[in-house]
Image (cartoon, grey):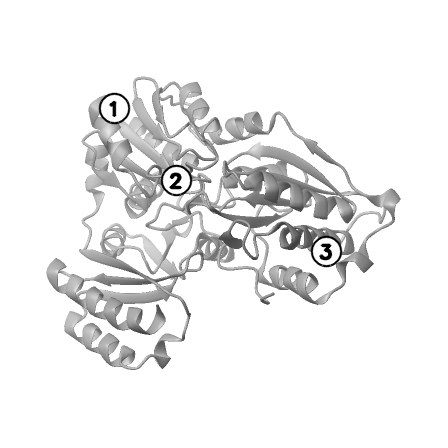
């Protein structure tokens, strides 16, 4: 077995392939359970408690049972909440005073992948140091020698009202003096974790909701629907003359939207709309937002024009959250649609982000089409190169020369960013600049060179 389990967003792989196999997952549960007991702040005999939620993938049942078995064998009690958005597990971990929370999901990936994200008792994703300790226990310890006596085995039970708790929590992030009365909303749940709670939240706030992507069958999560495929949602908006469309991904931690004309409102634009409203209301802490290196330069420009600073981090909502916490800030996110309102949530929450945009529409009595004009994007090209190996880029012959030449040609009017994906076997190439044709050529040149070496 390999010696690394965790990527940039937990553990993720094809289900029934290493490391997402029942035996490895069980050991992960045992390792986490042992660490919870070892680091117990209460009495030694007190049972630790872990909340486990999931999205709608077929393999979720298998992973759920393996994790629960591993935790139970270490004397940890497990509370199973079933399909629920990733941010809902962060919330419930805190709300139910659990010692940890686990989400079984591969987020926006196809159904045949699955993954594990772990939250600490504070509702935030666990630290890298704790991930490394779990890896050490899985690979280098005889975990069976650490098991408690048979009298100390834990129990598992299902929590029936978890969805209701999350619905109330999300609704409470919407201003009490506003409703969604009069709004017709199309909601695409990606056949994923929000297929029940998403429509309920919007309907209870007064919206007329047209729901698509709410018929999960275990194999259709993210299948040409959801945040990665907003076209169907946009077509439904125009067909039913809706005011707005909302498209979530499989675990509902990210969102993209469309206005009544079907025009896309991505994560950068959602950030811009919300940042300016929060600055106006005096709730944008530090007059600063946090974004990643993948965000469009157009966002930088509109924020600078309005006196809002930007802090950039590596790609991944975990890094955005770390930066927000470190500097006491309140808003951050990614162009892909992970938007974090740290005053409300410990991680990206697609439903909360959508409600924030809807509240701006209501507060200003302004359609999303008008709000969407807040920023002008700089032309941007993104190429994904499938990789078989992850060689350091500086070791690839000709890469540094080509990279520096493209930077020189852009003459400070654009930018270039190349990175390996933390969740998929891909290399991502982003090029921005004033000339769409030119930056496409640059991206193709880099993709051809790197594909030859890495595929």
Q: Is residue 366 among the parts visible in the rendering?
A: no
Between the C-alphas of marks 3 and 2, the distance is 34 Å
Between the C-alphas of marks 3 and 1, the distance is 50 Å
Residue on which the image places disc 1: 242
Residue on which the image places disc 3: 35
Residue 121 is labelled as none
Q: Residue 72: horizontal and vertical position, in percent? A: 75, 44
Q: Residue 415: horizontal and vertical position, in percent? A: 24, 66
**Residue occupying the point 47% across, 26% down:** 196
61 vs 121, nearest the viewer: 61
Q: How crowded is mark 1: few (under 14 residues within 10 Å), some or many (20 or more)?
A: many
Q: Residue 106: horizontal and vertical position, in percent? A: 48, 47
Q: Residue 147: horizontal and vertical position, in percent? A: 81, 53
Q: In this view, does 164 lie above or below 221?
A: above
Asked whether the beta carbons under mark 3 and mark 2 sit within 8 Å of each other, the answer is no
Q: Tell me where residue 436 sits by quadrant.
A: bottom left
Q: Tell me where residue 339 sits by quadrant.
A: top left
**Residue occupying the point 68% across, 42% down:** 68
Residue 222 is labelled as 2
On the picture, is 182 further left or further right than 87? left
Give the secondary structure at mark 1. Answer: loop
444 vs 323, nearest the viewer: 444
Identify the mark nearer the N-term, 3 or 2: 3
Q: Residues within 10 Å of mark 3 (few under 14, many from 20)?
A: some
């Amino acid at each position: 077995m390999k010696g690394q389990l965790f990527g940039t967003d937990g553990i993720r792989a094809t289900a029934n392939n290493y490391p997402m196999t029942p035996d490895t997952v069980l050991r992960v549960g045992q390792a986490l359970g042992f660490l919870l007991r070892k680091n117990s702040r209460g009495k030694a005999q007190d049972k630790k408690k872990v909340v486990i939620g999931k999205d709608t993938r077929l393999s979720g049942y298998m992973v759920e049972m393996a994790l629960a078995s591993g935790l139970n064998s270490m004397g940890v009690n497990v509370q199973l909440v079933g399909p629920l958005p990733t941010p809902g597990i962060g919330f419930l971990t805190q709300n139910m005073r659990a010692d940890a929370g686990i989400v079984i999901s591969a987020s926006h990936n196809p159904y045949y992948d699955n993954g594990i994200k772990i939250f600490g008792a504070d509702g935030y994703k666990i630290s890298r140091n704790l991930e490394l300790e779990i890896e050490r226990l899985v690979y280098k310890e005889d975990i069976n020698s650490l098991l408690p006596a048979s009298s100390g085995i834990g129990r598992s039970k299902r929590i029936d009202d978890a969805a209701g708790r999350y619905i109330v929590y999300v609704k409470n992030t919407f201003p009490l003096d506003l409703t969604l009365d009069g709004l017709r909303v199309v909601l695409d749940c990606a056949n994923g974790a929000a297929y029940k709670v998403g429509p309920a939240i919007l309907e209870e706030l007064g919206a007329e909701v047209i729901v698509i992507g709410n018929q999960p069958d275990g194999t259709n999560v993210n299948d040409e629907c959801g945040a990665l495929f907003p076209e169907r949602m946009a077509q439904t908006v125009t067909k039913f003359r809706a005011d707005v469309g909302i498209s979530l991904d499989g675990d509902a931690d990210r969102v993209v939207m469309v206005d009544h004309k079907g025009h896309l409102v991505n994560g950068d634009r959602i950030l811009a709309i919300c940042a300016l409203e929060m600055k106006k209301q005096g709730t944008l802490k530090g007059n600063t937002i946090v974004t990643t290196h993948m965000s469009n330069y157009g966002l930088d420009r509109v924020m600078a024009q309005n006196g809002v600073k930007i802090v950039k981090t590596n790609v991944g909502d975990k890094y955005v959250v770390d930066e927000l916490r470190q500097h006491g800030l309140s808003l951050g996110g990614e162009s892909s649609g992970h938007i974090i309102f740290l005053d409300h949530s410990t991680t990206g929450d697609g439903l909360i982000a959508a409600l924030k945009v809807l509240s701006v529409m209501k507060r200003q009595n302004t359609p999303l089409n008008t709000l969407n004009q807040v920023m002008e994007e700089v032309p941007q090209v993104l190429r994904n190169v499938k990789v078989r190996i992850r060689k350091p880029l500086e070791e690839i012959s000709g890469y540094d020369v080509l990279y520096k030449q493209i930077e020189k040609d852009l003459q400070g009017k654009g930018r270039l960013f190349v990175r390996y994906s933390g969740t998929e076997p891909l290399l991502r190439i982003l090029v921005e600049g004033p000339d769409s044709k030119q930056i496409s050529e640059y991206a193709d040149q880099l993709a051809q060179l790197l594909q030859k070496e890495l595929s």
